[in-house]
Amino acid sequence: MNILDNHLLPSLRKLAKAALVLLLVGCSNSAISPLANAEDPTTQQNAASDIDDTTTMVVQKIENPFPKRVPAPPFPKDMEWLNTKGPLELKDLKGKFVLLDFWTYCCINCMHILPELKKLEQEYGNQLVVIGVHSAKFDNEKDAANIGEAILRYEIEHPVVNDDQLKIWTTYFVSSWPTMYLIDPEGNVVYLRRGEFQAEEIQQVLNAAIPYYRQNGTLNEKPIEFDLLAYSQEPTQLRFPGKILADEASNRLFIADSNHNRIVITNLEGELQDVIGTGEIGSADGDYASAQFDHPQGMALVQDTLYVADTENHLLRKIDLKNKKVATIAGLGRQGTSNETWPGMGANPTVDNLPPRYIGTPKTTAINSPWALWPHEDSLYIAMAGPHQIWKMKLDESEIGPYAGNGQEDIVDGPLLPSIPYQQGFSSFAQPSGLTSDGKTLFVADSEGSSIREVPFNPRASVKTLVGTSKLSSARLFTFGDVDGTARRAKLQHPLGVCYVDGVIYTADTYNNKIKAIDAKTGAVKTIAGTGKPGTADDPAQFDEPAGLTHAGGKLYIADTNNHLIRVLDLETKQVSTLEIKGLKPLPVKNRPQAVAGGNAQ
């Protein structure tokens, strides 16, 4: 607490006590109790509409909708700010509701609420300012340049402060990601919400509160424009490519051009063959020119069918490469909830009502952030990052459901699936993000635990950890590093991609900016490319958060995500080159609004 001024301590003690009350409110599925004293804004509007010019009326005073409130502690002075011209102070935002989003850019739960924040920003642009408080988990996430890339990758349109020393985190008594605090126009903390939430929850709070502050004269409804990083970007052929898939037999390379919301097909030499998708965010099926995606990631090829993990649509898509058609085969187009993690189970499972298998039909089952795909025999295996599980779908599209993982976010070995959701003593994963196989075992890049896992195709066998943290008694999700050597000694940092070739698992050790080779039997780890420093150099090789890799013709093709490039690593010579994509036109970047260009931006 030495970072706090003494005069703040009484307020912060109140904040710590109030947080318990606010948390109970924020996590409740029932009516929002801090608003119990608020009048119905609909009733107020209807009453106002009955007034004419000749009517004299005493307007009833609206009670403050937040009985529990404490002054919001100010931000420290020595902080790095991004997505805005300069540092912001809470006192300068008086008159606005301010929503503080405590996040870290690796976190799938934090990713899930970004679209919800965008809905709020669009609906309450005149009343609300969202501020992202980036409180890093991984060392790589503390760097402001990396946070800037994450802001661009996630298309964030609000200011972000780099809380790399957890100063604001500590001040606000935050303990997990994501956490949200709402500050009212008078500068008081009035609402706390931990975990994922839907925009509708915060809409209820704001709709009930806005009339009070409007009547009280403390609500400033003049919009604020921020000078976004997106306005200074140059067009690129690819934009944050996430995953990549090579097919040596057909001489094709499939690239998930994630932030361009499309799939790019070239040959292995980089000559453009096709582009699938309009580039606009959407979920439309149809031909290549009309289909839409939302930040697609992993792909799998089965004969002339390309399967795509349409990640932010929470869908699986199927592309008929002969007829050039895109179809949706799984998902509802919205994020599956925790109650839907076990399809076919029902809301209140007991031992007596458990189904024989946790399966649903693909088109009626909600899924949650599919990130990577792998075909094996008659099934498609899915790294389902959202519920921290491996799922399995029959290629005939008859059924889909969990295959491994109890739903707890952790690195725990053991039998594939429990009989009851979240049951201890079974395997746990932590945001699985990459898949590969030797034909007998599915290897998983388990990113949040910085581990490489082994998932057997035999449903009676158990999950094991090849490299990683499963044997630790604690801190399994917080132990990481950049260490080569034996499986016991080696450490990775948030790996997102894996590719098996001849007894070796190559991994995109994403936050270490390296490509590493792992012996599939012993787990011994060795860096084969990358200095560790972000960059685009070929010799010595540099990468910037590479996320996907694939193999063909003795070469690894690497999705070098933050560099917007495809890199090629010759496995014999260990030389790295940059693939030139011939014929692919860059898409336009986000334009700076005239008002911002005129100097009215923050």
Image (cartoon, grey):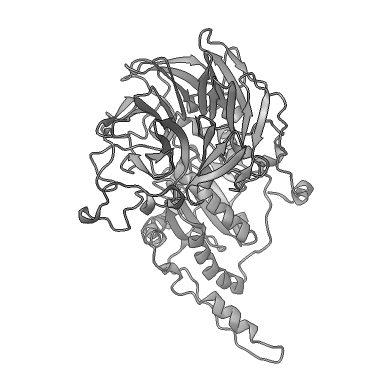
Q: Residue at x 51, y 23 (%)?
A: 550
Q: Position of residue 459 (x, y in %)?
A: 28, 34
Give coordinates of residue 433: x percent, y percent.
45, 34
In the displayed structure, 369 sits above or below 239; it is: below
Q: Position of residue 183 (x, y in %)?
A: 52, 59
Q: Residue furthest left?
A: 352
Residue drawn at point x = 79 percent, y = 49 percent: 598
Asked if residue 83 lies left or right of residue 599, the reply is left
**Considering the image in quadrants, where does the N terminus appear?**
top left
Position of residue 153 relative to residue 222, above or below, is above
Seen at 57% across and 24% down, the residue is 534
Foreground of the two, 91 or 541: 541
Q: Is residue 2 above or below residue 70?
A: above
Report the front residue among 1 and 360: 360
Instruction: Give the total of numbered labels.
Output: 0
228 on left or right of 308? right
Task: Please tell me which residue is depicted at 31% across the width and 27% down the height of the picture.
Answer: 465
Q: Is residue 189 visible?
A: no
Quadrant of residue 129 in the image? bottom right
Quarter of image, res 558: top right
Quadrant for residue 33, please give it: bottom left
Residue 64 is situated, as x and y percent measured from the top left of the image, at: 50, 72
Q: Is residue 476 left or right of residue 369?
A: left
Q: Nearer the viewer, residue 589 or 406?
A: 406
Q: Is residue 471 placed above or below 518 in the rendered structure?
A: below
Residue 366 in view of the camera: yes
